[in-house]
Image: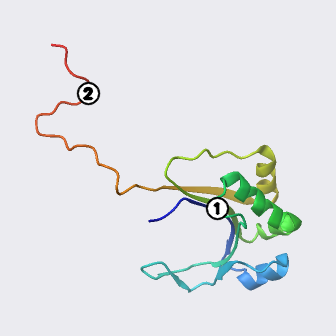
Amino acid sequence: MQRETTVVRLRITSATLTAAEIEAKLGIKPDESWKIGDRTGTFGAILKDHGYQLDSTAMMTTRLEDHFRSMLKRIAPVAQKIGEISTQAKVEIVCSIISKIIPPVSFQKDDLRWMAAMGASLEVEISMLVDRNAQAPAAKKPGDKEGPASVF
């Protein structure tokens, strides 16, 4: 069974800058990288951009806010360089949450300032966990009425 997890990533993609060039500019080795023409996913889709990715260092079960702060702490020293790269590449902060309930999602204005300074967009992905052992609601029978019972 899949468990609840949260991850925040800095993802930089570019048709012209390779992951090695981005690493050279930032001085931080990526946690994941790829190049144009690499295959990904179940169906082997061909990637159209080079990619450089850093992951938050907080534990996977930690709250979104803590992951976000962990990522900002990791990239703060190179925020200006990331901003410079954003003129030649797409810079994103990707927040991925897998949860049993819809979690609260909010960002402080200082967090948004950091993203703006880096030329980064924000993507939030929320996936809901389904308890397969939970009892499904009873199926409706032909003739069952919708809504509240009639008073007539």
- Which of the image's four quarters has the C terminus? top left
Residue 99 percent across, percent down from the top left: 52, 54
Q: Visible in this render: residue 92?
A: yes
Q: Label 2, label 1: how many angstroms apart (C-alpha)?
A: 40 Å
Question: Which residue in the protein does label 1 denote?
Answer: 94
Q: Nearer the viewer, residue 6 or 116?
A: 6
Q: Residue 50, percent across and down? A: 65, 80
Residue type at mark 2 is: Gly
Which mark, residue 7?
none
Q: Is residue 136 above or below residue 87?
A: above
Q: Is residue 39 above or below residue 77?
A: below
Judged from this view, the residue extending furthest toward the left is 142
- The residue at which mark 2 appears reads as 147
Question: Would residue 83 be seen by someone viewing this image from the given angle?
Answer: no
Mark 2: which secondary structure? loop
Nearer the observer: mark 2 or 1; the answer is 2
In the picture, which quadrant includes the N terminus?
bottom left
Q: Is residue 105 above or below residue 89?
A: above
Q: Position of residue 53 (x, y in %)?
A: 69, 73
**Label located before the other in sequence (2 or 1):** 1
Q: Residue at x 30, y 49 (%)?
A: 135
Q: Residue at x 77, y 56 (%)?
A: 69
Residue 14 location (% of width, % of height): 68, 75
Q: Residues within 10 Å of mark 2 (few under 14, many from 20)?
A: few
